[in-house]
Amino acid sequence: MASSITHQLIESHLVSGSLDPDSEIGLRIDQTLTQDATGTLVMLELEAMGLDRAKTDVSVQYVDHNLLQEDHKNPDDHLFLESAAKRFGLWFSRPGNGVSHPLHQERFGKPGATLLGSDSHTCAAGALGMLAIGAGGLEVAMAIAGEPMYVKMPRVWNVRLEGGLPDWVSAKDIILEMLRRHDVKGGVGWVLEYSGEGLSGLSAMDRHVIANMGAELGATASVFPSDEQTRCFLKSQGREQDWIEMRAEAGASYDREEVINLSTLEPLIALPTSPGNVVSVREVAGKPIYQAYIGSSANPGYRDFAVVAEMVAGRRVADGVSLDVNPTSRQILQNLARDGYVLALLQAGARLHQAGCNGCIGMGQAPATNRISLRTVPRNFPGRSGTREDAVHLCSPETAAASALTGKITDPRDSDRPYPNINEPTSPIINTDQFTPPPNSSAGEQTDLVKGPNIKSLPEFQPLADSLQVKVLLSVGDDVSTDEIMPAGARVLPFRSNIARIADFTYIDVDPTYVDRAKAHDGVHAIVGGVNYGQGSSREHAAIAPHFLGLRLVIAESFARIHWQNLINFGILPLTVESAREHLQSDDVLSIDQPARQLRDGIDVTIVNQTRSTRLTAHHALSQRQQDVLIAGGLIPWMRSRI
């Protein structure tokens, strides 16, 4: 049978399992990516495992999220990460180098390779013909230690791009069109594989935009061919030797197929508070804005900034509007400066920030209360910007720039200037000396980990109890995100290496009483959720912090892939019940007799609601290996038992 690119990538890295959809497969991981908001836990996990040295081809530790240094916590953690990179044999990217995903594409991305990252937008690397998957940090730690990455075999969805983009429409509008059609749950269980003649007009960084926001669809990964556009990109980075062609074989079959005619697309915008809440810009044009934000991993390329600079050149940003420019890498900033685009932005009134994630993760650039912020970032979950009552809209750089000039949401097609056709630099500045390479093995083994006072050891994890009795302390709705379970931003993320402290922020913006009630409760507890529980970020703090507070059971109608796995990794049992919130309410006391035996016996688990004297049949989708992990108390004790 002719193979898709996705099947070629999986088959070449398969170490266990079969290609039957939804069965568990184990994949050999070539590269890993960790960033500072998740990497501290990964490094502590490697220490707990007693790892000598990374066993991957390439592993890189980036510092791009927590760049605000209000006190000692963030800089202390940067030193810890640098020492851990030396100790375990990882590349290290210092603060100011830029966002991990475009940086990785510039320096390390390799067609045909697998990449696992402790960041949900790791999937952006699919732009180069890689199989790139976001996961919880503990799974990435296992991959660094040489263990396979386990995932349910996804189905493959071919998205064929036909025609060409009209002026004022760009790659961001393509992925917003996918979200308009399918919403934030539409890609769960799928790999999106892009093909078609429309790809010829999309650069490697344009493809990065689309692959990056596959995470917002809930997709396992997004995959593009490695073709002449890929080759041109790698050649421009001085890495043409890393290029190989990756194409679907003639007649390749797919589980689902879809066509997007690029020539029919128009500028789109995602309204608060979901990336799937997409309408045309025309429908909301005229609303006054406070902020236009350019940058992030979702629009990281040279052209994404250059097109804005061309649009605002010789003009002035509207009164009352903050045009925030967040370069995504030091290298891109250098090229923009050399080519005059930074000067044009500054003269127009733009605010230039350091290369990094910054406002995308709520680290600065927070908008004013109840004022519209147009952002080229990937997510607009409630409060993610750092402002509780924010009104973040997701859009293209063209829409953001046009609106910054008028002071209101503006369709860029109404511009009185011709569309700027940006050519990528043929001889870009290549910044190869900002990364610290791994030391030789003997030097790494002699490196001590540098731990500031905020870094605390991981809590202990206990095996699954013979009988589980829990009280429901919280009931939440559909599409609860990991940003709502464990907020991002400057007030929270500095405590990422201190589980006891960061646990105090669990669900704080959803139910401020939850933490105190969990601490006062004498025993373990449960949470009940709706559809797509745990969508969004890969941050495992959204599992480990509630576990610290006593969470042992989550019952939902369905789970987002990464968070579901994170719950298992930290010894929390995830079960599904249809219409769960109709049968279970806060303060109900639930019991599960011999949960380990019930997991072993099949997919059904009986829950007794002692408060209401009812019995429910719940389901699990755990593989044999995942059952072993959960029964052991999580991935760390399971790993220890095997050493």
Image (cartoon, rainbow, N blue to C red):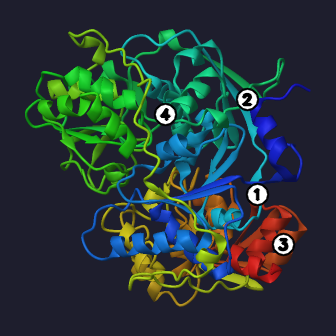
Amino acid type of the residue that numbered disc 4 sits on in the rendered structure: Val
Q: Nearer the viewer, mark 4 or mark 3?
A: 4
Q: Residue at label 4?
A: 209
Q: Amino acid at mark 1?
A: Tyr
Amino acid type of the residue tagged 3 in the rendering: Gln
**Disc 1 to disc 4, how far (Cα)?**
26 Å
Q: Tell me the SS state at disc 1.
A: strand
**C-alpha span from label 3 to label 1:** 23 Å
Residue depth check, mark 1 versus mark 2: number of the one nearer the observer: 2
The numbered disc on residue 298 is none
Mark 3 to mark 2 CA distance (whole Å): 44 Å
Q: In this view, which residue lies farthest toward the right?
A: 1
Question: Alpha carbon of mark 1 to alpha carbon of mark 2: how far?
Answer: 23 Å
Residue holding disc 3:
598
Say whether disc 4 or disc 3 marks the residue closer to the N-terminus. 4
Q: Which is nearer the N-term, disc 4 or disc 2?
A: 4
Element on which disc 3 rests = helix
Q: Is residue 498 visible?
A: yes
Image quadrant assignment for residue 483: bottom left
